[in-house]
């Protein structure tokens, strides 16, 4: 397939020529990275932007997949995460709702962050596998949040996308756990599931996380509207803070 170089924040990446590359905000991403590196608080991101700069709006897309799993779950999680990214980090966002895309949609490459969730089976066609690989190797980021029951099928399909790579567990010292908020013991535990510890797995490409898999925690449930699940306020806050760490990692890597 013919590819054309498209500029991401701080680097050139390749994407299918027929589609636009994920826009991470050409003005915003370097600003966010600099502010966070200097140890400033989240509110300083807004103040650090150059006068008159017009950063691109940040988007999240929900990935619709085949196989029968409930890709549509956690209905309010992403809109709450987008709102918090705007209010707490000063990130310009494109509306209050997450888009919905399939791997074959041309719009796929317009979104820097893909979100995948569910309890059941995940299945990609051969064409979808090729498309997801192009997206992820071209600079895109996929976050899969385990709703309990997706583990086996997600791992199977990811091996089809990256047969040469493996998910590895992130150590507690990884920058993901201190992007904006400090999580010295890794992912917060929101729901019990099997009672094991919350675990973060990642698949790396060119030194950055291309796929993040949050397992046995259910961050998305913690980010839903109050009253959707019987989670106390402190757990909901921890889930949202971790979600913001993910957003800031996507914007700065």
Image: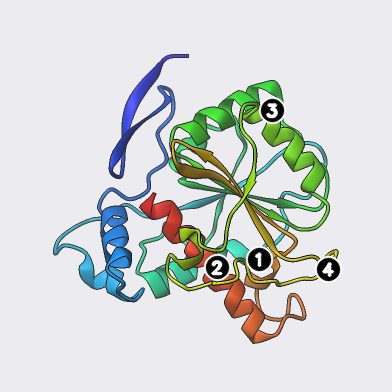
Nearer to us of marks 4 and 3 is: 4
Q: Residue at x 64, y 85 (%)?
A: 233
Left or right, 214 with reference to 56: right
The numbered mark at residue 160 is 3
Asked whether residue 194 is in view, the answer is yes
Distance, label 1 to label 3, CA atoms, is 26 Å
Q: Earlier in the sequence, mark 2 or mark 3?
A: 3
The answer, for residue 69, to whether it is visible in the render is: no
Instruction: Bin the neighbour count of mark 3 within 10 Å (Cα to Cα): few under 14, some 14-19, many 20 and up.
Output: some
Gap between marks 2 and 4 measured at Cα = 20 Å
Disc 2 on helix, strand or loop?
helix
Q: How many marks?
A: 4
Q: Which residue is mark 2?
A: 242
Of residues 50 and 104, the one drawn nearer to the viewer in this rendering: 50
Tell me if label 2 and label 4 are in contact, CB under 8 Å.
Answer: no
99 to 177, vertically: above or below: above
- What label sits on residue 219 in the rendered view? 1
Asked if labels 1 and 2 touch by Cβ distance under 8 angstroms, the answer is yes
Which of pointers 4 and 1 lies earlier in the amino acid sequence? 4
The quarter of the displayed image where residue 239 is located: bottom right
Residue at figure coordinates x 43%, y 29% from the top left: 19
The residue shown at (31%, 61%) is 32
Please tell me which of labels 4 and 3 falls first in the chain: 3
**Residue named by callout 4:** 195
| Point 32% across, 52% down: residue | 56
Badge nearest the viewer, 4 or 1: 4
| Numbered disc 3: secondary structure | helix
Which of the two discs, 1 and 3, labels the residue nearer the N terminus?
3
For label 2, the crowd category at 10 Å Cα-Cα, with few meaning under 14, some 14 to 19 and many 20 or more, is: many
Residue 81 horizontal/vertical position (percent): 53, 66
């Amino acid at each position: 397939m013919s590819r054309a170089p498209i500029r991401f924040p701080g680097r050139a990446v390749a994407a299918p020529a027929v589609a636009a590359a994920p826009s991470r905000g050409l003005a915003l991403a370097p600003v966010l990275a600099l502010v966070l590196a200097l140890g400033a608080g989240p509110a300083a991101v807004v103040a650090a932007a150059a006068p008159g700069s017009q950063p691109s709006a940040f988007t999240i897309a929900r990935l619709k997949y085949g196989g029968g799993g409930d890709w549509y779950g956690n209905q309010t999680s992403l809109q709450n995460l987008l709102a918090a990214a705007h209010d707490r980090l000063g990130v310009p966002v494109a509306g209050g709702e997450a888009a919905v895309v399939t791997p074959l949609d041309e719009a796929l490459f317009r979104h820097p962050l893909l979100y995948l969730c569910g309890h059941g089976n995940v299945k990609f066609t051969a064409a979808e596998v090729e498309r997801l690989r192009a997206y992820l190797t071209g600079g895109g980021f996929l976050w899969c949040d385990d709703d309990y029951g997706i583990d086996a099928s997600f791992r199977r399909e990811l091996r089809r996308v990256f047969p040469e790579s493996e998910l590895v567990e992130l150590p507690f010292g990884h920058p993901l756990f201190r992007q904006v908020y400090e999580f010295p013991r890794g992912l917060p535990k929101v729901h019990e599931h099997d009672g094991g510890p919350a675990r973060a797995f990642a698949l790396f490409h060119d030194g950055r996380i291309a796929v993040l898999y949050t397992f046995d925690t259910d961050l998305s449930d913690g980010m839903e509207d109050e009253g959707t699940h019987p989670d106390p306020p402190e757990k909901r806050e921890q889930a949202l803070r971790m979600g913001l760490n993910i957003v800031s990692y996507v914007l700065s890597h």
